[in-house]
Image (cartoon, rainbow, N blue to C red):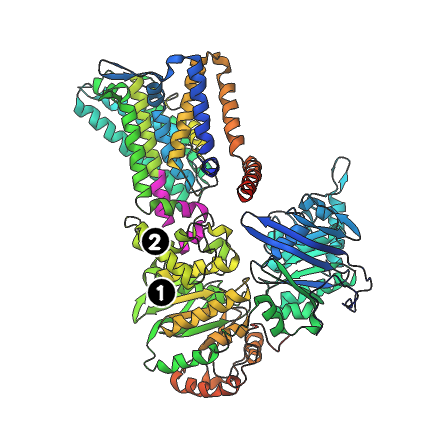
Amino acid sequence: MTQQTEPAAPAQAAPPATATAPAPVVEMRGISIGFPGVKALDGVDFRMFPGEVHSLMGENGAGKSTLIKALTGVYGIDAGTITLAGEQVSFSGPAQAQAAGISTVYQEVNLLPNLSVAENIMLGREPHRFGGIDWRAMRRRSAELLAGLGLDVDPGSLLGDHSLAVQQLIAIARAIDVNAKVLILDEPTSSLDADEVAELFRVIRSLKGQGVAILFVSHFLDQVYEICDRLTVLRNGQLVGEYLVDELLRIDLVQKMIGKELTALDDLEHRAHAAVVDETDAATFVTATKLGRRGAINPADLPIAVGEVVGLAGLLGSGRTEFARLLGGIDRADTGELTIQGENVKLRTPRQAISKRIAFSSENRRDEGIVGELTVRDNIVLALQADRGWARPIPKKKQDELAQSYIQALNIRPGNPDALVRNLSGGNQQKVLLARWLAIAPRLLILDEPTRGIDIGAKAEIQKLVFNLAENGMSVLFISAELEEVLRLSHRVVVLRDRNVVADLENDGLTVDSLLALIADGRVASDDEALDERAPAVAVAAVGSGAGPEASAPTTPTTSTTEGDHS
Amino acid sequence: MSALAKMASSRLFWPVVMLLVLFAINLVAFPGFFEITVRDGQLFGSLIDILRNGAPTLIIAVGMTLVIATRGIDLSVGAVAAISGAVACSIILGSPDPGSLATVAVAVTVALLISLVLGVWNGFLVAVLGIQPIIATLILMTAGRGVAMLITEGQILTVNSPPFKFLGSGFWLGVPIAVIIAAVVFGLAALLTRRTALGMFIESVGINPEASRQAGVRARGLLFAVYTFCALCAAIAGLILTANTAAADANNTGLFIELDAILAVVIGGTSLAGGRYSLVGTLVGALVIQTLVTTVYTVGIPPIATMVFKAAVVTIVCLLQSPTTAEALSGFRRRLAVRSGKGVAAS
């Protein structure tokens, strides 16, 4: 394995096969950026070749975003040089960088949903004619761009009418209109399902063929390995190295990102099953019977036992989030019944669910989760305080104790309860949210995509937490787009497709492939063991021993959560 | 240096500086500006005048602060003030004994109760029907004057009732009643929101309504509460204004006071985008506005230039508070800190 911690020697790193030009289009040398009290980047070198897909890897806080912002002119650099196509450049703002050919598409699509697709693509550089906007030229140019990307989208349609995935592709069309030499895609796939990712990759490959250098930033290792030619690893603001993707094993990559052996997850699988064996009484905490909501999820059944982790698997729009929202009282069910510990209840508001000790942690961290301008402390106590009512404030001292204990238990950084949550990284915001829900001592914790868009270290910590909670008798409903994660954590997996529950299976020798098959065509692998009948103790005991072979091979990189054979 | 930097980064820094500058200007133009004398056991002086005349604006601004913190706005406060004045005056006029304390008590109580209804109406439009606050309260802003007009039957109702007049121009322990009422409203609001969890909920709903709902905060009830409280504040201010002139004028009582109140809130550092609010900031903001009015007189600015002068001052405060200026200033401060930090390291 060639390991180039000295990227200053480009001769050794053979450019990817598809790339023809040997000279890098972007070369950043010795980049340093400091913020008060922090050195965000410390002498980092980075380069990109034309016609390659490059990935920037690192945990949250490694300096990825800072490096991107230095490249796109958002931040000024304290030291170092940036060379673009052989010329040294110094951008004083994103507009300059864009004019020079560096375009960025951010994780959240920053477009205007109330304008047409064409207007969005051409916004700020509309073609003019007779002192007015030349609408026809604008539409024609947009149509060309969309066709160039192989997208069948009417330029006159409203942007907001399209799915998030299509909006993202339109954002890319906008970005490449300015003759981009470099296209930066920041977490472009975090809210896309498999088909949409495939579509995005098709577009990326076609751009790559046109000689565009693409920086692909993603937390999904699978995708990085599928699409990228080369990657650069950062850690704590410093360069770890630049590698060819083909020559770096995933487990090595993860270790380079984390900087230590990550064994935390290795033993989780076995502990999961052990926990269920204890649960002989199998008391049911909550039962949904024919629970449904028009236009969201068709009537479905779901029992969840005390201390059980149930995974919901399915594509985006399969009804997985919609179903969970009914259980969390976020949306009202219009059919069916919900029983909590034998008592029939109707959840009309999240507040009622919380009073029944059901906590719902939304997948949409920014819009439905954190309260950004409030402090870490306020965010942690918010749900507990709301449950107590406004007239019984939690004493300041108690709040501090609570915040401090969760900051320590969940390893929230920075560990300052007075910090504004807005300023925390994604992973730490997610931990603050978890702390908020744990503070109400839930009996059922519904986690919708809790590990999305966060780094692998925080991901491991959150997965571990889910285990410990379930061991202590908390029921967990766990939703994740990463099937490996669902399989690793869940005692039972419920598969949804097209707003229907299509399977309810013990996690008994299930594989990613068998789940994928269910998600894809909705056929239940073996009808006997599915749906109605649940015989946890026996079935799971079998799993316990069945896990043996896996256990004997601890070198299996369970750490790379996206390690799967479906790529 | 660090203490100064900390002070300078406080949201209250510029409003307070503004207020001090205005005080200084007044002092130059009128050396007796800070003098407070006791006449007939009552306090007199420019500062007392500022407090007394600023009381109605402050009272409304307190309510407005909470509304704005929820990401809302209430344009109807002036109209509500006019209605409450009209209601009180027409009750007093219609009673056989306008000078009795009981009559005034009934009049004030009815006026305040009606304001509660008006506040609930605003809250209903915003919280239940989901109408944008600026539109929802615009309805009452325009309709309210009409309602007040109907109550006064188009007349300016002049009342001769000493107990009522006392509300606007009386003194207690030497302090103007209006100031005492304002202090009580301010203190109650501060206690009610900061000693309970209300303040946190209000901010939370203002910053992220959906996240707050999912965390179990009763956003709807909270909106009802703040709009109702704001209307109540407006009614109290309306009673003071009406009592001060002993006349209810449907057209002019509390005219444009909503703008002064919003201005006071903004000068005090509470963002119109909702979220974190500062009642102390609002207090400073209201004082700045009232001191400005006084300054116009003491400095002798011609009345026709008054509005322009006020606009200029407001522009300066807003400029000082804009994020761009703040960034530039903090950059300057950082460079300063780096330099002094180096100095420390070297020594």
Q: Position of residue A429 (x, y in %)?
A: 48, 57
Q: Residues within 10 Å of mark 1 (few under 14, many from 20)?
A: many
Q: In the shown orientation, is residue A34 left or right of residue A389?
A: right
Magenta region: which residues? B203-227
Q: Residue at x 43, y 61 (%)?
A: A434
- The reply to whether label 1 and label 2 mark residues of one chain is yes
Q: In the shown orientation, is residue A558 left or right of residue A388?
A: right
Q: Report the amino acid beneath label 1.
A: Pro
Q: Could you tell me if residue B88 is visible in this image?
A: yes
Closer to the camera, B47 or B143? B47
Q: Main secondary structure of the magenta part?
A: helix
Q: Residues within 10 Å of mark 2 (few under 14, many from 20)?
A: some
Question: Which residue, given by chain and number where applicable, does mark 1 sit on?
Answer: A442
Closer to the camera, B343 or A139? B343
Which of discs 1 and 2 lies nearer the camera? The answer is: 2
Please give the chain letter of the residue carrying mark 1.
Answer: A
Q: Residue at x 17, y 19 (%)?
A: B97
Quarter of the image for residue A349 reads bottom left
Please give the chain letter of the residue carrying mark 2.
Answer: A
* Alpha carbon distance from label 1 to label 2: 18 Å
Q: In the shown orientation, is residue B96 left or right of residue A306?
A: left
Question: Which residue, given by chain and number where applicable, does mark 2 sit on?
Answer: A399
Residue B100, compared with residue A263, is above or below; it is: above
Quarter of the image for residue A388 reads bottom left
Disc 1 or 2, which lies upstream in sequence?
Answer: 2
The quadrant of the image that shows the N terminus of chain A is bottom right
Q: Residue at x 35, y 53 (%)?
A: A400
Residue A185's disc is none
Q: Could you tell me if residue A153 is visible in this image?
A: no
